[in-house]
Amino acid sequence: MLRAALALLSTLQIGARIKESFERSLRQAAIIAVGVVLLVAAAVFGLIAAYHALVSIYQFDAAEAAAIMAGVLLLVGLIVLAIASSMGREPKRAAPSPLVSTPDPTAMIDQSVGKAMQQVGPVPLLAIAFIAGVLFGRR
């Protein structure tokens, strides 16, 4: 009889601990959700402020400002995807120095562009070059 009572008490304590843990997790999830909503609101406000700054201060028309904002968002998205995809990889071993194997500068530039094309891909590299050309061409 005493054993059954102790087993019931132990079960009730475990149930209370599970309930407390669940309530704590629910509170944490609610706080995280509020934080995410505030971060999204801050990002939207920042984008709107940047758009208005491009239009009013730098005298871009609406289409140009929207294109610049889209390009910047594309660039940030590509950087985030590149970082996310490189997180799961094993670190690479040290390769021999390219300066030793290629003495002439044009071959070194060609080799660097080739490595960039392999790591990033041709379309994102073209998009980055286009955005850089538009931004530096305006000045």
Image (cartoon, grey):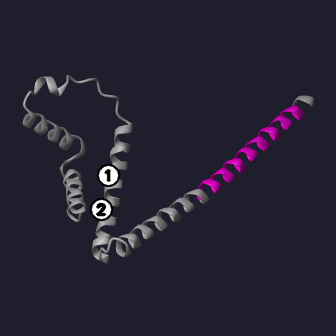
Q: Amino acid at mark 1?
A: Leu
1 w.r.t. 72: above or below: above
In which quadrant will I find the N terminus? top right
Predominant secondary structure in magenta? helix
Specify the quadrant that holds the C terminus. Answer: bottom left
* SS type, badge 2: helix
Q: What x and y, as percent, mark residue 16?
A: 79, 43
Residue in the image at 51% along x and 63% along y: 42
Q: Which residue is mark 2?
A: 71
The part of the chain drawn in magenta is: 4-33
Q: Position of residue 127 (x, y in %)?
A: 22, 56
Residue 89 location in percent, x, y? Answer: 34, 34
Residue drawn at x 64%, y 56% is: 30
Instruction: Please give the name of the residue rendered at 31% of the width and 55% of the height, measured from the top-left corner.
Output: 75
Q: Against 39, is 122 above or below?
A: above
Tag nearer the camera, 2 or 1? 2
Q: CA distance from mark 2 to mark 1?
A: 10 Å
What's the amino acid at mark 2? Answer: Gly
Residue 67 highlighted magenta (yes or no) = no
Residue nearer the viewer, 39 or 97: 97
Q: Residues within 10 Å of mark 1 (few under 14, many from 20)?
A: some
